[in-house]
Image (cartoon, grey):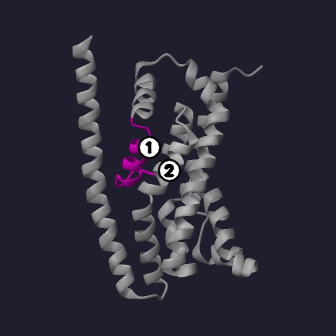
Amino acid sequence: MVTPRQRLALFVGALSVLAVVVVALSPVSEQGLRDAIEPFGIAGPLAYVVLSALLGILFVPGPILAGASGLLFGTATGVLVTIAASVLSSVLAVQLAHRAGRPGMAELDHPRVKLVEELLERYGVGAVVVQRLVPGVPDTPCSYLYGLAGLATWKVALGTLIGAAPRAFSYTAIGDGLGGGSSTTGIIGGVTLVLTAVVGALAGAGLARRARSDRAAERGEG
């Protein structure tokens, strides 16, 4: 019989292999996505939400999926599609991790594991928002981490809805601009991406300072 810890190890191992395979093979292309969506006609945006969410939990990079959304649907529709796909992808990842690995994670009596769980429980939605804003931090591994740590699904969904929106607009607008749309839209998307990175870095630093301050205060009270 497979123990919870063994299930956790198998789950993390499978995710690691999958991530390496996807990065190495780069299986997604704009033309391939277009071919997959065209048969759905006017329901294409809805179909892409599902397709993008599924590709997201398979570690296909979010910027590629968001940019393709801009190429396929333009900025206005593409932003809504990208945000919806981001939220759905995060929910799916959290649920997968929660069911497959959470029991094993709960058995781990390691200070760092407990610290992560404590911080996520304390800051909840705010922690997810900041993570989604911080530049260079991929969303999918973090979504799996949230599920393993036991963070409520609704908190991840809400945090993603808020935090992923600026980057969703940026990459979608850039994709629209590169795909023959307005060059101004692409430039605005690029500027927004830079501003989001700055805000995210500042927010991340602020949250880290607050966490250290709170822990120091608790130790002082003890």
Residue 136 sits in which quadrant? Answer: bottom left
Q: Image point 35% across, 52% down: which residue? A: 134
Q: CA distance from mark 2 to mark 1?
A: 7 Å
State the quadrant of the C terminus.
top left
Residue 160 is situated, as x and y percent measured from the top left of the image, at: 48, 52
Residue under label 2, please give it: 158
x and y, in percent, of residue 10 in the image:
65, 32
* Percent x, y of residue 214: 27, 27
Residue placed farthest to the right in the image? Answer: 1
Which quadrant does the N terminus fall into? Answer: top right
Q: Nearer the viewer, residue 14 or 45?
A: 45
Residue located at (63% from left, 65% from top): 49
Residue type at the position of mark 2:
Leu
Residue 197 sits above or below residue 112 on the image: below
Nearest the eye: 66 or 84? 84
In the image, farthest residue toward the top: 222
Q: Which residues are magenta?
A: 123-139
| Residue assigned mark 1 | 125
Q: Is residue 7 covered in magenta?
A: no
Q: Neighbour class for label 2 at 10 Å: few (<14), some, many (≥20)?
A: some
- Residue 132 painted magenta: yes
Q: Main secondary structure of the magenta part?
A: helix
Q: Pointers 2 and 1 in contact (CB under 8 A)?
A: yes
Task: Inspect the image, locate mark 1, and give the three-letter code of the amino acid beneath it.
Answer: Val
Instruction: Say how many tags the image has.
Output: 2
Q: Position of residue 209 (x, y in %)?
A: 23, 36
Instruction: Work out whether mark 2 precedes mark 1 in sequence or the reverse, and give the earlier one.
Output: 1
Residue 201, which numbered label? Answer: none
Q: Secondary structure at mark 2?
A: helix
